[in-house]
């Protein structure tokens, strides 16, 4: 069995190559086998429905690589500023732009040139004037502090080598009270309970197919909390069967002992993840409390 790749630059290069090739070929889904990922129809149709896609020009590339509907979770409002981490061909950005309206604005962030090329072409075709696509790394978001109302993402954070840094930078760019609403691939349960080591398990899965880098639900919650988020919620929206993992993950999965592979049944999930940046930061709360104490002291000392 292979050992998991730990070189962050090698991981990013592999992800860029994988998704650059997929957007150029027009193929959908995270992995190599379209049928199980897409449920027999294109992922974008499954996630967003024909009615939403019908609002876009017919020549817009609507290929999606997602695993959930982060837009439904975000419940965007007119006038909000939105950031899509790993925006791909721009589908979610364009749908979000319609929801926030002309008084809102949506940024798409991606590190793959082929994705950005398609996304910008799509935006031009739709005539969207309230969107911008930025090239960059989601571990180092090229936007100012406290500039965004809502962060969305669809099956992308699992691809980042340093997820803790992604969440810390997401917290940085959110305004106080800002919302974090993403879909991601997540392991449900403790990986130490499996009959193989975590390294052996991750070595048998693919980074580019979304599984090898996935966090556990407990890890995700811990990293969000460490970044400063509150009101954290993780809800499983889909559980992958062993057959789907074999189709969408990696042929190396076959190198796992049968009992280890079987133990993955239902443990790999699509998860809806929500959190908020506190409306009042701790320092502000402490300052307010000190001010109130001072006022009370003056009143009682008269």
Image (spheres, rainbow, N blue to C red):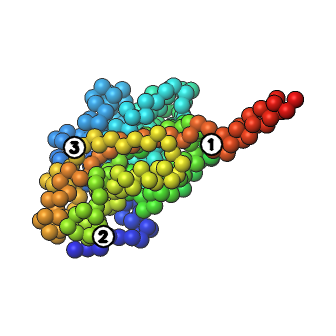
Q: Earlier in the sequence, mark 3 or mark 2?
A: 3
Q: Is residue 81 left or right of residue 232?
A: right
How many C-alpha atoms fall within 10 Å of the one at disc 3: few (<14), some, or many (≥20)?
many
Q: Which residue is mark 3?
A: 38
Residue at screen point 30% across, 25% down = 51
Residue 61: % across, % down: 34, 40
Q: Earlier in the sequence, mark 3 or mark 1?
A: 3
Residue at screen point 22% across, 46% down = 239
Foreground residue among 103 and 119:
103
Residue 281: % across, % down: 62, 42
Q: Is residue 201 left or right of residue 100?
A: left
Residue 85: % across, % down: 46, 47
Image quadrant assignment for residue 256: bottom left
**Which quadrant does the N terminus fall into?**
bottom left
Residue 218: % across, % down: 37, 53
Q: Which residue is mark 2?
A: 199
Q: Which residue is mark 1?
A: 281
């Amino acid at each position: 069995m292979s050992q998991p790749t730990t070189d962050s630059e090698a991981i990013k290069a592999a992800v860029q190559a994988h998704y650059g090739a997929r957007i150029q070929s027009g193929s959908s889904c995270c992995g190599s086998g379209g049928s199980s990922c897409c449920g027999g129809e294109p992922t974008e149709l499954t996630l967003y429905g024909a009615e939403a896609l019908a609002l876009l020009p017919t020549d817009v590339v609507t290929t999606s690589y997602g695993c959930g509907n982060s837009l439904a979770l975000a419940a965007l409002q007119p006038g909000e500023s939105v950031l899509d981490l790993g925006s791909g061909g721009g589908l979610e950005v364009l749908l979000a732009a319609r929801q926030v309206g002309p008084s809102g604005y949506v940024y798409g962030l991606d590190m793959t040139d082929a994705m950005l090329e398609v996304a910008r072409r799509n935006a031009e075709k739709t005539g969207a004037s309230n969107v911008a696509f930025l090239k960059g790394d989601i571990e180092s978001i090229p936007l100012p502090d406290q500039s965004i109302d809502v962060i969305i993402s669809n099956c992308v954070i699992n691809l980042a080598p340093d997820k803790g840094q992604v969440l810390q930078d997401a917290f940085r760019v959110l305004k106080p009270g800002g919302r974090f609403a993403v879909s991601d691939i997540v392991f449900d349960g403790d990986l130490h309970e499996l009959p193989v080591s975590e390294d052996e398990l991750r070595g048998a899965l693919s980074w580019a197919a979304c599984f090898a880098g996935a966090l556990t639900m407990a890890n995700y919650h811990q990293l969000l909390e460490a970044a400063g988020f509150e009101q954290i919620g993780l809800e499983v929206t889909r559980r992958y069967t062993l057959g789907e993992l074999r189709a969408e993950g990696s042929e190396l999965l076959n190198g796992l002992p049968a009992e280890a592979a079987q133990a993955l049944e239902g443990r790999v999930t699509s998860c809806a993840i929500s959190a908020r940046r506190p409306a009042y930061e701790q320092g502000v709360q402490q300052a307010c409390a000190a001010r109130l104490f001072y006022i009370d002291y003056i009143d009682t000392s008269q």
